[in-house]
Amino acid sequence: MTKYVTPKEAANTQGVSVSSLRRWEKEGKIKAIRTPGAQRH
């Protein structure tokens, strides 16, 4: 079973800010899963 984490949890795990994760997603460096309500996971 796949476990999804919130952007905040992922940022804390990686030692970066949430804005860095969002930028990396925009640049295509990482992929985020979005819920039907457009929230990132």
Image: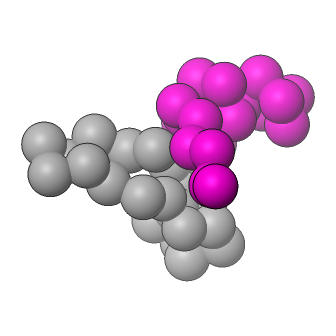
- Give the percent coordinates (x, y) of residue 1: 64, 55
Left or right: residue 18 versus residue 9 is: left
- Give the percent coordinates (x, y) of residue 40: 38, 44
Where is residue 15, by image quadrant? top right
Left or right: residue 15 versus residue 24 is: right
User: Is residue 7 on the magenta stretch?
Assistant: yes
Whether residue 11 is visible, yes or no, is yes
> Looking at the image, is 16 positioned above or below residue 24?
above
> Looking at the image, is 40 positioned above or below residue 18?
below
Left or right: residue 39 versus residue 14 is: left
The front one of 2 and 30 is 2
Give the farthest residue toward the front.
Answer: 1
Whether residue 17 is visible, yes or no, is no
- Residue at 63% from the left image edge and 45% from the top image edge: 3
Which portion, as a residue range, is magenta? 1-20
The scheme the figure's colours follow is one colour
> Looking at the image, is 20 positioned above or below residue 8?
below
- Residue at 57% from the left image edge and 43% from the top image edge: 4
Where is residue 11, by image quadrant? top right
The front one of 36 and 3 is 3
User: Is residue 30 on the magenta stretch?
Assistant: no
- Give the percent coordinates (x, y) of residue 18: 58, 31
The front one of 14 and 34 is 34
- Give the percent coordinates (x, y) of residue 37: 13, 43
- Residue at 32% from the left image edge and 54% from the top image edge: 34
Give the farthest residue toward the left.
Answer: 37
